[in-house]
Amino acid sequence: MMPYTIMGMTATAAFVSVMLASCMHAPSPARDIQEAQAPRSDSVTVALWHMDETGGYQVADSGPHHLDGTAGQETRTDFGRFRGARVFSSSIQSFVFVPYAPDLDQQRTMTIEAWVNVTAFGTYEDTPIAARWTEQPNEQSWLLGIVGQQLQPPLVSMPTPGYHQAWVRLGAVGHLVFAMQPEDASVPQVYFSSQPLELKHWTQIAVSFDGQAVRIYIDGRLDSQYATADRIRLSHAPLLIGNYFDPRWLRAFEGRLRAGSGVDSNPYYAFQGSIDELRMSSVARTDFPSARGR
């Protein structure tokens, strides 16, 4: 004798199908928590690049000013700390370029924050995460990066151009470095984190400036702070993410940007790893909810 009737089997199967469908479409609790903690644009956000694109070269800004960027052809998209991230490689064509806009100028107070997953420390003096800094006169505002190994030939094939050598030499490999150019003519002011970043590990990093102090945060916790009363120099420097080179090298090609031919193609300052949730704010933040629980 069959233990179930055909009608019972049909009803049971339907019940199981409904339950499976419900499980498939119900949000994951872990995903809900992750979505809630992801950085969001608020009233003091200048720009927020989620890096959530699934391909292509456009990098959208979800902030109020829509400061969209363009990625170089040697970047790609992949899973990030929250949804997607932009992956950078050791190439001169690995970058995100955001043209200058007046909204990028934050002279008195600001915060730069991001999630980073570093796969290797640079072989030269540093690898910028994000910077408004060029070698052109009066085009230096600030630079946030990671101190590199500072190798010299024969350990590397080519000597460094030395753009940041004078002020990074005091830093230790893997530590955050933040440089700001004061409004008054003087040498750059340079600050380092007290601890290095961990390789192949997602880390939330931030630097804030409130007109009186520079503070560096790692995973939401205050790592170091330095007194300063200067203001950041205003400049027409664009924002370059994940690399450092003369932006005048950039050429448009079939709707894409690339460092043009005839330039030094050695990737001295190329960031290696992933960058996610890069946010720039007009105030000195002290709370970073996305890093809670780390």
Image: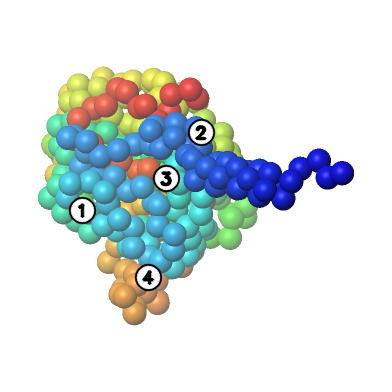
Q: Earlier in the sequence, mark 4 or mark 2?
A: 2
Instruction: Say which of marks 1 and 2 sits in front.
Output: 2
| Amino acid type, callout 4 | Arg
Which residue is found at the position 76% from the left and 43% from the top?
Answer: 4
Could one spot residue 250 in this view of the protein? yes
| Amino acid type, callout 2 | Ala
**Vertical arrangement, residue 30 with respect to residue 55, above or below:** above
User: Left or right of 247: which side holds 12?
Assistant: right
| Amino acid type, callout 1 | His
For label 4, the SS is strand
Q: Which residue is mark 1?
A: 66
Alpha carbon distance from label 3 to label 2 = 19 Å
Q: How many marks?
A: 4
Classed neighbour count for the residue bearing mark 4: other residues with Cα under 10 Å, few (<14), some (14–19), many (≥20): many
Q: Which residue is mark 4?
A: 258
The image quadrant that residue 226 belongs to is top left
Q: Which residue is mark 2?
A: 30
The image quadrant that residue 70 belongs to is bottom left
For label 3, the SS is strand
x, y percent for residue 111: 27, 33
Q: Earlier in the sequence, mark 1 or mark 2?
A: 2
Which residue is found at the position 49% from the left and 40% from the top?
Answer: 26
User: Left or right of 26: which side holds 42?
Assistant: left
Classed neighbour count for the residue bearing mark 1: other residues with Cα under 10 Å, few (<14), some (14–19), many (≥20): few
Instruction: Say which of marks 3 and 2 sits in front.
Output: 2
